[in-house]
Amino acid sequence: MRRSTERILTTHVGSLARPHDLLEIMREKEHGRPYDADGYAKRVTTAVADVVRGQLDDGLDVVTDGEMSKVSFLTYVKDRLAGFSAAGGEKLMPPSWQVEIDAFPEYYAGYLGKYKETVSPMTTMVCTGPVAYAGHEQLRTDVENLRSALSQEGIGGRRETEAFLPSTSPSGFGRNEYYGSYAEYLTAVAEALREEYLGIVDAGFLLQIDDPWLIEYLSENPSTTPEQRRRDAEQHVEILNHALRGIPEEKIRLHTCYGLNHGPRIHDLEFREIAPIMLKINAGAYSFEVANPRHQHEWRVWEDLTLPDGKILIPGLLGHASNYVEHPDLIADTLRRYVDLVGRENVIAGADCGFSSRATFSPEVHPTVVREKFRALAEGARRATDRP
């Protein structure tokens, strides 16, 4: 994993808006209707090439495939894990979402209604048999598409570039109706997803674990106690580390965020309660929300918390819920706070979350605005590097 030794590097979290013509084919595929399979595969390939070129044009150093092949960062595993079935339309609704919805029902009635524009709903998966990894072909295609995009003329030789592929953590997408305990179920899922983790690293890419569920375990939930929530989070960390065993930490990025993306967020847990547990996950870099106004002040966490040797912070400096473009000087100011606390070589400039965490015709941030945000991030990182 490259470090910001000569200048502050830039990256983002992963998901980007899929082109509308790709979404139209994906919608037919997801609903089991006839579609052009060859045309779909070719369009994913060209979409990956386009978004990789765009990221590099906009000044990012560590890039990815934009998750062009996935219906969401989470429920894409429905096609990659055996042992699951659909829960009959049961929507995914984490407890922390419900707490916030109950506080602002009028707002969320409109907000959640926007998801009608997604190509398929995010529904709960039910584990009804032994879990096994079945996504080898899909993973191989993702790897080949990203590798091909990076090797194209005008892309690969432009600068020293690094690439990552995201993969979900074992939690959050399913309900257990097969294994004797929740821990046994999570361990089985972790073992299956480990095959994807290893495949990404073996292909020569950085592995990013998308893990909003770490914060979800710790967040407000009327049905549990704070002590139980802490135990659940610690168990989650232990099982995730088991799945990551043997993979060099410098090949792993962890991304965690607050599950309810675009609302008042007054129930968000303070980051000081999350960071010490986050650091227990065996990763080389940690990506988290900062641009979110509920968390901009939390750089102070690192005044009291020591970053372990060799670790990197990827603070989010671009909001994924607003079409405002952050000013490069604001980005530079925030970066300098982190640099002054943990050292420049230990900071990479990132974003709060993905810009299209599910395949939708109406992402919250317009794709043209996202590109302008990326340019602001690159310029802000340059200004922060140049400051004495």
Image (cartoon, rainbow, N blue to C red):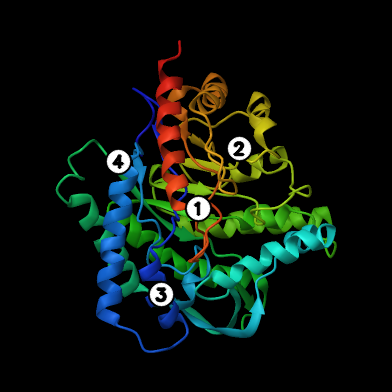
Please determine whether, in this image, residue 17 is positioned above or below residue 141.
above
Please determine whether, in this image, residue 240 is positioned above or below residue 127.
above
Which one is closest to the eye, mark 2 or mark 4? 4
The residue carrying pointer 3 sits among few (fewer than 14), some (14 to 19) or many (20 or more) residues within 10 Å by Cα, namely some
Which residue has dot 1 on it? Answer: 355
Which one is closest to the eye, mark 3 or mark 2? 3
Q: Residue furthest left?
A: 153
Q: Which mark is residue 269?
A: none
Q: Which mark is residue 290?
A: 2
Mark-to-mark CA distance, 1 and 4:
18 Å
Q: Amino acid at mark 4?
A: Asp
Which residue has dot 4 on it? Answer: 57
Q: Amino acid at mark 3?
A: Glu
Q: Residue at x 80, y 62 (%)?
A: 106
Mark-to-mark CA distance, 3 and 1:
19 Å
> Which label's residue is closer to the chain start, 4 or 3?
3
The x and y percentages for residue 105 are: 81, 63
